[in-house]
Image (cartoon, helix red, strand yellow):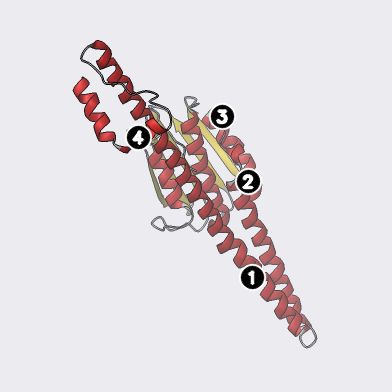
Amino acid sequence: RAGLAAAFLAGAGGIVAEACLTGAFVEHRPLTAGPLALASVDVYAFVVLLIVVLRDARQSRAAAALAERRRIARDLHDEVGHGLATIAAQLEAAERVRATAPERADQLVEKARGSAVEALAAVRNTVATLREELVVSGDLAGALRRLADDMAPLVGVPVEVHAAGDAVRDPFVVTNVARIAREALINIGRHSGASKALVRLDTREGDVMLQIEDDGIGIDAHGGGNGLAIMRERAGALGGTLTLRRGSAGGTALHLVAPLGETPSRTPTR
């Protein structure tokens, strides 16, 4: 046992030095053979392991936060920025032709008004991604119902929720599944042209099964945009899989299947 622990310490290298600098090892004394020495080595090994876990957790949280900020910046640039530029161009064009072609100017102003509505919807969707209220405690079915109520006016379509099975209260599962559902509903509002959305949850037989379907035009199941990569990352954190296919109503059907037991990572992704 001492040999294994000592080998672990030796392999930790710089982590041991970090432990010394942070005060984890207040005093170093040569260890002599005996039960106390073995116990001391075990304690040191545990401390080093704890430091490694905490450091990795900090790095994971920082990386997730940075990725989320970059995604929001892209959304603002690609959608809000483009929308505002379009509005400015349409109004400038209307001003130029106001005296000679007033009907054309009115058409351009009307187009600018439509662009403003689209830009406002993009802002609302971006704000929705920042609402930490959607990362809720309590059971998963209730979280999805509250999510649907909150998101319906933002995405512009009614959202219906059907839930069956056992109550799921694991904060890790609730948080990640709710974030997947939120991203899917945002995509429906942005890209699908749907008139309604349906969320189905089934938590029987040790799995959580989520299906979100719309009656719109569908989206590219293999594309890298539309938040698909983020949703797949969250599904992976749950130890599950996420797939997209053509829905029964002609739009897109998202399917998530994940186990309710232990998962590879217990740090919710952003």
Residue assigned mark 3: 137
Q: Residues within 10 Å of mark 1 (few under 14, many from 20)?
A: few
Left or right: 179 with respect to 260? right
**Residue pictured at 39% horizontal, 38% vertical:** 56
Q: Identity of the amino acid at label 3?
A: Ser
Secondary structure under tag 1 reads helix
| Mark closer to the observer (1, 4) | 4
Q: Residues within 10 Å of mark 2 (few under 14, many from 20)?
A: some
| Mark closer to the observer (2, 3) | 3
Residue 53 showing in the rendered view: no
**Residue pictured at 46% horizontal, 58% vertical:** 225
Q: Identity of the amino acid at label 2?
A: Ala
Q: Identity of the amino acid at label 1?
A: Ala
Residue assigned mark 1: 85
Instruction: Give whichever of 65, 256 is nearer the camera.
Output: 65
| Mark closer to the observer (4, 2) | 4
Residue 35: which quarter of the image? Answer: top left
Q: Quadrant of the N terminus?
A: top left
In whole angstroms, how far apart are the C-alphas of marks 1 and 3?
40 Å
Residue assigned mark 4: 17
The first of marks 2 and 3 along the sequence is: 3
Secondary structure under tag 2 reads helix
In whole angstroms, how far apart are the C-alphas of marks 4 and 2?
53 Å
What is the tally of numbered marks visible in this picture? 4
Residue assigned mark 2: 152
The residue sitting at the bottom extreme is 100
